[in-house]
Image (tube, helix red, strand yellow):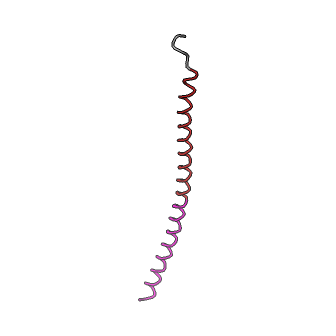
Amino acid sequence: MDEHRIIELEIKQAYQEDLIQALNQVVADQQKQIGKLEETCKLLNDKIKSLAFGDNQSGQADERPPHY
């Protein structure tokens, strides 16, 4: 193998290492974002459930009887 070919391969390998590091950072950032979104969805789901159960209980207590 001539020296020029080895240098080309080393350059390609260096670029690939940089690309892998950049992609790894993107994946890590996306995982953090997914975790935050999952937590937000859970909180919203809990809030919706609490409102649904709360509306049924308080709605019946605050309703006027039909004879009023």
Dominant secondary structure of the residues highlighted in magenta in the image = helix
Residue 35 locus on image (x, y percent): 55, 53
Is 1 in front, or is 65? Answer: 65
Is 45 in front, or is 30? Answer: 45
Residue 47 locus on image (x, y percent): 56, 38
In this view, which residue lies farthest toward the top? 67
Residue 2 locus on image (x, y percent): 42, 89
- The relative height of residue 28 versus residue 48 in the rendered view (above or below) is below
- The relative height of residue 31 versus residue 48 in the rendered view (above or below) is below
Q: Is residue 4 left or right of residue 65?
A: left
In this view, which residue lies farthest toward the left? 1
Residue at 51% across, 13% down: 66
Magenta run includes residue 21? yes
Residue at 48% across, 76% down: 13
Residue at 55% across, 41% down: 46
Is 49 in front, or is 20? Answer: 49
Residue at 56% across, 51% down: 36
Give the magenta part as a residue range.
1-28
Residue 63 locus on image (x, y percent): 55, 19
Magenta run includes residue 20? yes
Is 22 in front, or is 53? Answer: 53
> The C terminus appears in which quarter of the rendering?
top right
